[in-house]
């Protein structure tokens, strides 16, 4: 069978791209190296609150079995020597709780939440456009520029100035201007570092924090939503939407190289030796893999291969899954509802920064920054910052020891555990460096520079070759944005 397009990589963005192309009447094949689709939805992430609502509606994902649960609490920040701080979906309720910690912080929180929403709304609009080519003009750039200008003009003068000032800021500075309590500042600012190789005092982490609230109802505390049957249920719903539209999905089909003939894409060759022809190949994998491994060096050329090789992919996040024999008892938590959202261990800004410093110099901090969720007797923990080749057992022990500080006795209730270091994430999920976002979301790899300057319009080095994964604008996280935007550009071409 011949195909109009091949989507290489069956992560959520690849499935989104395939579903939208198939719904437009194209014959689409998805090839995935693993035994099932979903990518990082299969055991790396637990929350899916950043998924674009418009995409859920367009693909009718609820009709395909997706059910989302949004607990009233977004985040619980554990503290040493004090009661945890609860961040609710309702900013007013959060402020009421903060009054016991700091009257000034309680007063500031609703205003800060509103401020974050205004700035994040602009980034949400930015996420929906195709970046212009800054190194050379491209057809259609004026439309993106006009839309961007209109979005900017909708900001009041103060918000416009603040947006320009805030994006390159360190999240610690951005949050520190509003709050006095270290535990409050750390819990809010640390969100700008999760899944990155940056600490809260790193430039550009405010842009990451705001992007995390873009296109959703996250606000200052970030969005928290769960697929009721687990993250894999989201992948299953998108896959169902794609197959219902006519897409074909093949697992255990690893791409070895992109076929190019006559100066344009001709299909892919699998590791098995099979060749599949199509005039379009959309890649849901990371851009470094595509440009340095899949594309023939003669087609990429030495300069692009050098640039692609320098795409920063320093994975620094480990995943620790703990199966518990009983519910954990956290100090100061007497209401189980408080544990329904994200549980953050970030006692202070400098605590988080010191953990980053250890990683920066090649070490593993004894006090990692953690973000956890609890479901069906298991705890899913993201540990930040973990060296690429760290010993999994050592990482698991450190995570349990840190949790013991806040939930005494939790170690004895761990019946089983699974640890994925960045090296294991790279091996199991095929992500260069083990970076969950496919490429570091720093200012040098943001918007028109993602993945590299000149290739931010989803079109790669050869006509017919596209990027639809998290290494493309608007970047990582379970949004579906890169896949949706890439499908739009493929259909336009």
Image (cartoon, rainbow, N blue to C red):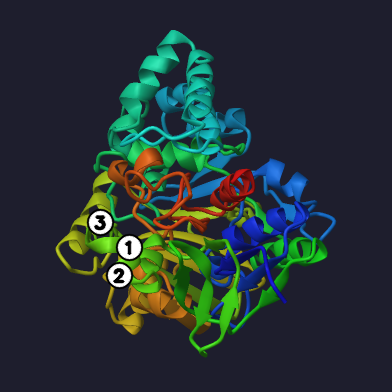
- Residue hosting label 3: 307
Task: Using the numbered discs, state the Cα–Cα distance from disc 3 to disc 1 in whole angstroms.
Answer: 10 Å
Q: Is residue 108 above or below residue 32?
A: above
Residue name at image x 48 percent, y 58 percent: 331
With 99 as the anchor, is 389 left or right in this view? left
Q: Is residue 84 above or below residue 151?
A: below
Q: Quadrant of residue 419?
A: bottom left
Q: Calculate the distance from the C-alpha at mark 2 to the C-alpha at mark 1.
A: 5 Å
Q: Observer-nearest residue: 152 or 360? A: 152
User: Residue under circle 1?
Assistant: 300
For the N terminus, the image quarter is: bottom right
In the displayed orientation, state which residue is furthest to the bottom.
272
Residue denoted by label 2? 297
Residue that appears at 29% across and 33% down: 168
Reply above or below: 490 against 250. Answer: above
Q: Are marks 2 and 1 in contact (CB under 8 Å)?
A: yes
Q: Earlier in the sequence, mark 3 or mark 1?
A: 1
Provide the secondary structure element on which disc 1 rests: helix
> Which of the 4 image quarters holds residue 360?
bottom left
Q: Position of residue 76 (x, y in %)?
A: 51, 49
Per the image, label 3 sits on a secondary structure element best described as helix
Which residue, as the protein is rendered here, is positioned at the far top?
Answer: 157
Q: Quick check: can you spot residue 186?
A: no
How many other residues sit within 10 Å of disc 1, few (<14), some (14-19) or many (≥20)? some
Dot 2: element: helix
For marks 3 and 2, give the CA distance: 13 Å
* Name of the residue lying farthest toward the front: 262
In x, y percent, where is residue 301? 27, 62
């Amino acid at each position: 069978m011949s195909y109009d397009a091949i989507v290489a990589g069956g992560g959520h963005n690849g499935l989104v791209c395939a579903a939208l192309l198939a719904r437009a009447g194209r014959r689409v094949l998805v090839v995935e190296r693993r035994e099932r689709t979903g990518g990082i939805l299969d055991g790396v992430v637990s929350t899916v609150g950043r998924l674009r609502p418009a995409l859920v509606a367009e693909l009718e994902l609820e009709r395909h079995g997706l059910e989302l649960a949004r607990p009233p609490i977004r985040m619980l920040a554990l503290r040493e020597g004090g009661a945890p701080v609860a961040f609710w979906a309702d900013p007013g309720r959060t402020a009421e709780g903060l009054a016991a910690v700091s009257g000034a912080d309680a007063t500031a929180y609703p205003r800060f939440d509103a401020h974050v929403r205004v700035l994040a709304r602009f980034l949400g609009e930015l996420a929906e456009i195709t970046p212009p080519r800054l190194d050379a003009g491209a057809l259609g750039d004026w439309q993106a520029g006009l839309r961007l200008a209109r979005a900017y003009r909708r900001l009041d003068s103060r918000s416009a100035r603040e947006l320009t000032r805030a994006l390159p800021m360190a999240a610690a500075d951005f949050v520190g201007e509003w709050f006095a309590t270290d535990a409050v500042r750390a819990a809010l600012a640390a969100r700008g570092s999760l899944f990155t190789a940056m600490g809260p005092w790193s430039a550009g982490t405010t842009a990451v924090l705001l992007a995390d609230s873009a296109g959703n109802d996250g606000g200052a505390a970030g969005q928290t939503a769960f697929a009721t049957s687990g993250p894999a249920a989201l992948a299953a719903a998108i896959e169902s939407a794609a197959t219902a539209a006519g897409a074909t999905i093949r697992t255990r089909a690893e791409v070895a190289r992109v076929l190019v003939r006559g100066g344009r894409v001709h299909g892919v060759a699998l590791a098995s030796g099979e060749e599949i022809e199509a005039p379009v190949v959309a890649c849901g994998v990371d851009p470094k893999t595509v440009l340095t491994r899949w594309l023939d060096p003669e087609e990429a050329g030495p300069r692009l291969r050098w640039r692609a090789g320098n795409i920063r992919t320093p994975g620094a996040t480990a995943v620790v899954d703990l199966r518990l024999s009983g519910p954990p008892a956290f100090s100061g938590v007497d209401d189980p509802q408080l544990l329904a959202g994200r549980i953050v261990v970030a006692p202070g800004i400098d605590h988080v920064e010191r953990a980053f410093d250890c990683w920066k110099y090649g070490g593993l901090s004894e006090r990692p920054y953690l973000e956890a969720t609890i479901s069906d007797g298991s705890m899913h923990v993201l540990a930040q910052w973990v060296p690429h080749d760290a010993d999994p057992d050592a990482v698991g022990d450190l995570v349990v020891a840190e949790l013991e500080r806040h939930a005494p006795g939790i170690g004895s209730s761990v019946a089983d555990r699974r640890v994925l270091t960045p090296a294991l994430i790279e091996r199991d999920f095929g992500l260069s460096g083990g970076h969950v976002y496919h490429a570091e979301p720093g200012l040098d790899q943001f918007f028109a520079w993602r993945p590299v300057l000149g290739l931010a319009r989803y079109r790669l080095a050869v006509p017919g070759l596209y990027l639809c994964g998290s290494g493309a604008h608007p970047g990582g996280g379970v949004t579906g944005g890169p896949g949706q935007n890439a499908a739009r550009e493929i259909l336009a071409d």
